[in-house]
Amino acid sequence: MRIVPWNLISTWHCTRCGICCRKYDVVLKLPEWLNIVKAFGVEYTAASISKFLLRRRADGSCVFLHWTPNVFLCSLQRTKPKACKLWPFKVLDKPGYGSVNDAEYHYGHRRLFVYVDPMCPGLRYGVPKPEFVYSVIPEFIEIALGVRHKQFKTTANL
């Protein structure tokens, strides 16, 4: 899989397809793990030698993923881990996947590098549209930096 820079994306929106919840392991930070254990119980998580994870079903999907007619929904909204909030975007302090010029994003006085996982079907390639550049990307950055917790543009509209 090749990660692509944000500047190749015209727009993005969550399609509630569930790919992120079916294909990827979610690594939890200790406070996230504690919140989930308090709210749901330890059986909804898994541990390895060096990390905590959301538990997966036998089919590989996250235990919090639920199918409703035509869409997948996450039942973990109030305690959703940062990794889930950020997918399909990756916000880095240093270029991590090449394409430095296309990945570069200036947020205030910070120079960041934003990449996108092309597996997400909500991506549309092309010249970035203003709402994507000035609303969606900044929200992902603010979530990554921990200055925003509530999602508006970076989640499915229910």
Image (cartoon, helix red, strand yellow):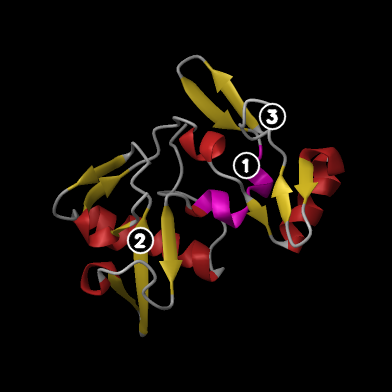
Q: What's the amino acid at mark 3?
A: Arg
Nearest the viewer among 12 and 4 is: 4
Nearest the viewer among 72 and 3 is: 3
Residue at left offset 47%, top offset 31%: 158
Report the mark closest to the observer, 3 or 1. 3
Q: Residue furthest top?
A: 69
Q: Magenta stretch?
A: 76-85
Using residue 89 as the reference point, say whether residue 149 is left or right of it.
Answer: right
> Disc 2 marks which residue?
115
| Residue density around tag 2, few if under 14, some if 14–19, many if 20 or more, within 10 Å | many
> Disc 3 marks which residue?
57
Residue 36 horizontal/vertical position (percent)? 77, 47
Distance from the alpha carbon under mark 3 to that under mark 1: 19 Å
Using residue 15 as the reference point, say whether residue 147 is left or right of it.
Answer: right
Residue 103 horizontal/vertical position (percent)? 28, 68
Residue 45 horizontal/vertical position (percent)? 77, 44
> Pointer 3 and pointer 1: residues touching (CB < 8 Å)?
no
**Of marks 2 and 3, which one's residue comes earlier in the chain?**
3
> Disc 1 marks which residue?
77
Q: Secondary structure at mark 1?
A: helix
Residue at left offset 69%, top offset 26%: 58
| Residue density around tag 1, few if under 14, some if 14–19, many if 20 or more, within 10 Å | few
